[in-house]
Image (spheres, rainbow, N blue to C red):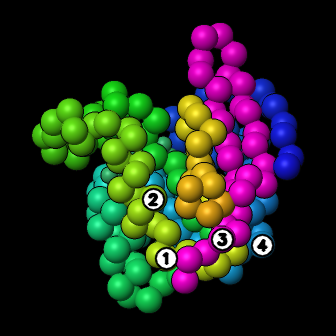
Amino acid sequence: MIFNRVWAMPNSETFSVKPIGEFVKKYLRDSSCSVDPFARNKNWATLTNDLNPKTSAQYHMDAEDFLKKSFADGWRFDLAIFDPPYSPRQISECYKEVGVTVGMKETQSAALYARIKAALIPCLTPRAVVLSFGWNSVGMGKKHGFEQVEIMLCCHGAAHNDTICVAERRVAAKI
Ligand SMILES: C[S@@+](CC[C@H](N)C(=O)[O-])C[C@H]1O[C@@H](n2cnc3c(N)ncnc32)[C@H](O)[C@@H]1O
């Protein structure tokens, strides 16, 4: 497993942080069909989505509904990018931006991540790679049949949290 630590200024557009953008592009080069359900304005993947209609993503749906629709439409991805809001506060801000009032249940990061991962798994090919970004290195995890390929800590200085970048490969697909 590759483990690396880099330094770069923070940016709310995660992949505009140079080493993080390079991390994503490295895996995109080996992919023939990719998905980014939380894309914001980064239309790097084959299929992109973001809840916020002001972004340039191809679809503007809740990520779970978008992935269920992609599966039903027959899409299968060898690379998935998982860059959701990182905290309950960020989740709440995202919903506020699109004018949706939500309660505590919807703003729990663990609950959001669990429902999106459950919808993502059926859309993945048996050896798919998932890139996860956030404040922990949980990723898809062994539970879902993934092994870690690479972890990159991106330190942003001062009292900022690192952005933790995780690449995992699916090794035990239940087909
Ligand atoms: C961390 S940002 C993604 C940044 C992007 N990767 C970049 O490099 O610019 C998370 C995005 O998820 C979107 N989002 C939040 N909740 C969502 C949901 N339930 N479904 C789909 N998109 C959502 C937000 O609008 C926000 O643009």
How far is mark 1 from mark 4, CA to CA? 18 Å
N-terminal label among 1 and 3: 1
- Asked whether 88 or 32 is in front, the reply is 88
Residue that label 2 marks = 117
Can the viewer see residue 116?
Answer: yes
**Magenta stretch, residue numbers:** 147-175
Residue that label 3 marks = 172
Amino acid under disc 1: Cys
- Give how far across and how far down residue 61 sits, in percent: 29, 63
Q: Which mark is residue 16?
A: none
Q: Secondary structure at mark 4?
A: loop
N-terminal label among 1 and 2: 2
Image point (35%, 56%), residue name: 115
Q: Is residue 71 above or below residue 167?
A: below
Q: Secondary structure at mark 3?
A: loop
Residue that label 4 marks = 30
N-terminal label among 3 and 2: 2
Confirm whether the magenta stretch covers residue 59.
no
Q: Secondary structure at mark 1?
A: helix
N-terminal label among 2 and 4: 4
Of tags 1 and 4, the one toward the viewer is: 1
Q: Is residue 171 above or below residue 62?
A: below
Image point (75%, 43%), residue name: 151
